[in-house]
Image: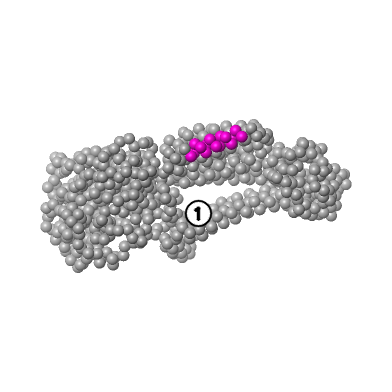
Amino acid sequence: MSARHGALLAPTLGAMPPTPSSPCWDSDALHRGSVTAAAVISILALGVQRPGGLLLAVVASALCCLAQWVAWRRRGRRSYRVVFALAVAMMACLGLFLGLNWARVLDPLTTVAFLFASLGIVQSFYLPARKDVEDALLAPALTMMAAATYSQELLLGPFLVLFVVAVSGALILGRLEECRLAAGLMGLPPKEAWRLVRPHARLLPMLLLLAGAFWLVLPRNLESRRERFPASTPAPIDMDLGGAIYNPIYPGLSAAAAPDARDEAGRRVPPDPFRSDGYFGLAAYMDLSFRGQLSDELIMRVRATEPAYWRALSFDTYDGHAWRMSEQSARPLPAREFSIDLPRSREEGPLDRESVRLVQTFTILRPSSNALFAAYRASELYYPARRIYVDSYGSLRSPSPLAAGTVYTVVSQRYPLAPERLRAAPAEYPSSIADPYRQLPEIPQRVRELARQITSPYDNTYDQVLAIQRYLEENYPYQLDIPVPDYDADTVDWFLFEQRSGFCEMYASALVVMLRSLGIPARLVAGYSSGQYNLLTGYFEVRARDAHAWTDVYFPGYGWLAFDPTPGFAASEEPGVRDRWVLTRLAPYLGGTLGIDALWSQAHAWLEATATALRSVRPWELGGLIAFAGATLMGGAALWFAGRRRLHRRVEPAVAGPPRHRITAAYWVWRRSLGTHDQTREPGLTARRLLQTLPPSGQAAELTDLFERARWSAQEPSPEEAERADALSQSLRRARPRFPR
């Protein structure tokens, strides 16, 4: 029964005495409190997702509580003046939203979240009836959706659980009050209301389980088809380095000048002390004498459809002890509405129809150098600055060091490259590639001989690269705590023949040097590996220990391809399929516990086949998946409203009461179907006077007569009269005149 009917129900009873078991329709503070709790939880969940947002969320929550208190004090009183004032306030919120959205064109989610929260608060000031209170759940639901879209960590989980509890409580309490009123009209004890509300209480857990099951099998991080992508900074960029590389953690490496410092043992000393929270490779000069172990501190989160190496800088010059860039300058690229189309060099090869778009959105969590991270072959950049810089190696640079809270998006093109095509690639290189990327200092002859020995069985570049990569992976264990070589020793030679263990910079340097000794262009690349994928949040979590170096090898017609000789790493610059289901991570544990490993293996094979098929899904084909999700939600909503409809249409059969109660219920169910027709009259409207306001109807007159005799006569009605009243009620509701609600 709706709020506007319940609020005026008592006056329509006329001389009927009040029923103790029928509480005032708008006096359920617990119901309004549940709605208020849902609104506050959604606002706080949104506030904790943004830096500095918690204080604003607390203020907004307090304002929401104030609005609910004002609505509670004014419950049951309608005022067109208040409605007009709130409409003006909502229009003001909409205008502010449009203004903010214009100012933050690449970060619309912030303004959308503001719109949902502000409209919810404004609406909370005017909730005269219970139906209005339940309608007020829409804004918190939209705010929670915005919070879930923002969420990059599991902190949202507790808020989501509390929100579901609050919303479920509000819905059940609303149905309970409605059923209490129905039971009171039939003269039944209040405990009978639980029998009426029980179907609704059972339906909510079923819907939650259905939503959870759907979430488990729904693929995560499908390719985005948007034309604009997120980009924002915590503060305006007010400095410009002019394209120079600067790392605030290692300022001594920014000059790209080789240090000439030694310790007491005559070994090289880096210009800056090692720090566990930053990578020394993100500078213009990479010194191979750094030693230390990086921490587990989160550096950034990346939302991408596929894992990739997040490359930052490339180095072409090796001096036996370190790597540097021979060309330091970078050319500026102006942004058009913070969107930049990145140029492609002729050496990278043309784009073709086989390329697959990879969208990456980076959220920087700690200050870093001004080198921008991106998967290889970046074609578009969305960055909140008027210009960015591109060096001669294709690396991207921000005008200033990256601040914590910076968000930007890169669109890259990836190619499915078959080994047969790479084996057939010619070994003829343009001078712009051959001259800088085959340069070597004086290196020991045994390094060259080892490279020739490993690659002698192969006659093409691709197999030669793989041969050296396998040799390094299989014969040199990974180790961080190794000593620093003597000052006069070549680092690669020392790694290959004396130390015979090392870390990623050693492996990558060895692969580059041996390939160059064979006349194959190669370079060293620094950045981060893809990081750990969090299936619950959909983000790659990149930590300081994920800092990495690998090797780029040039193939004419295809550009630079990544190869990683470090044990435990596998370079993947091609599009591929990865686990996108929460079920694929949980099922192995459940299978071992429940003994259903064979069943899980079959299900996993089916999911992998489905993932492979999804790679070729077009936007219009994705409609099937969306239709399934919509059908699931609509089916749940239909079940919910069907239960409500059944409650109002067949209250009497749900509670097998005496004929007097059945006749009373049949009358009030029909009367409710009249809409607001009987509620716009004067208070105290009796059944007989209501009948006079309706179009002439013999069935309505007969039902009214049965109701009056059942209510006021001392003689108990017969079961036949009860059945007649039920039949009249159903017939009148089918043929009732349509009054505005």
Q: Amino acid at mark 1?
A: Trp
The location of residue 318, given as percent across then percent down, is 17, 50
Q: How many numbered circles does the render carry?
A: 1
In this view, the residue farthest toward the right is 715
Query: Looking at the image, can residue 371 be seen?
Result: no
Depth check, front residue: 323 or 243: 243
Query: Looking at the image, can residue 214 be seen?
Result: yes
> SS at mark 1?
helix
The location of residue 531, given as percent across then percent down, is 35, 50
Residue 89 is inside the magenta segment: yes
Dot 1 alpha-carbon crowd within 10 angstroms: few under 14, some 14 to 19, many 20 or more? some
Where is residue 565, by image quadrant?
bottom left
The location of residue 323, given as percent across then percent down, is 20, 48
Q: Which residues are magenta?
A: 84-98
Q: In this image, 449 relative to 102: left or right? A: left
Which residue bears the numbered disc 1? 215
* Residue drawn 29% across the image and 47% down it: 396
* Residue drawn 43% across the image and 51% down it: 226
* Residue drawn 37% across the image and 55% down it: 357
For residue 579, above or below residue 142: below
State which quarter of the image contains the C terminus: top right
* Residue drawn 46% across the image and 38% down it: 100
For residue 377, above or below residue 69: below
For residue 710, above or below residue 14: below
Depth check, front residue: 602 or 125: 125
- By secondary structure, the bulk of the magenta-drawn segment is best described as helix
State which quarter of the image contains the N terminus: top right
Residue 94 is inside the magenta segment: yes
The location of residue 22, given as percent across then percent down, is 73, 40
